[in-house]
Amino acid sequence: MIYTLLINSVAVFVTAYMLDGVYIKNFFTAIGVAILLGLVNTFVRPILVFLTLPITVITFGLFLIVINALILMFVDALVGGFKIRSFGWAVLMSIMLSIISTILFWIF
């Protein structure tokens, strides 16, 4: 569990460093973002996916990227020291975050 938290924290930190539209204060903020992101993905995301199931099926699952971006914007509103400039940056961060975390889990 701590291993997953650290990998996700590094992924959040690296993604924020790579994107100009995303600001993160320090690595401790990245840990807080990873914790809150994990909680929101555990409790809120399944409800959102269920409610938007018809549009997700119509778009062949691509609407899940929008759901991930909305979750990142929600976490942005809750965590100080973490800022996403716009919805477009949130979509890009969502894509980059999933790619980087997958690579990190594959390596480690």
Image: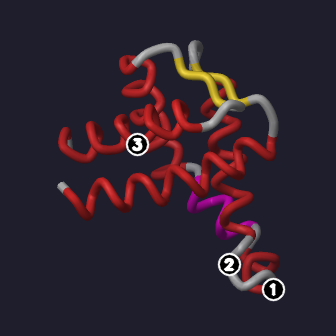
Examine the residues drawn in magenta and state their main secondary structure: helix
Indicate the amino acid at tag 2: Gly
Residue 68 location, x and y as percent?
64, 54
Whether the magenta-drawn stretch holds residue 24 is answered as no
Indicate the amino acid at tag 1: Ile
| Residue that carries the numbered disc 2 in the rendered image | 61
* Tag 2 secondary structure: loop
Callout 1: few (<14), some (14-19), or many (20+) C-alpha neighbours within 10 Å?
A: few
| Residue that carries the numbered disc 3 in the rendered image | 11
Task: Decide which of 58, 21 is in the foreground and name it.
Answer: 21
* Tag 1 secondary structure: helix
Indicate the amino acid at tag 3: Ala
Which badge, 1 or 3, is on the more N-terminal residue?
3
Residue 58: image tag? 1
Q: CA distance from mark 2 to mark 1?
A: 8 Å
Q: Residue at x 30, y 54 (%)?
A: 104
- Total numbered badges shown on the rendered structure: 3
Residue 31 location, x and y as percent?
37, 27
Question: Image quadrant for the C terminus?
Answer: bottom left
- The reply to whether the C-beta atoms of the residues labelled 2 and 1 are less than 8 Å apart is no
Residue 97 location, x and y as percent?
51, 50
Q: Which residues are magenta?
A: 45-51
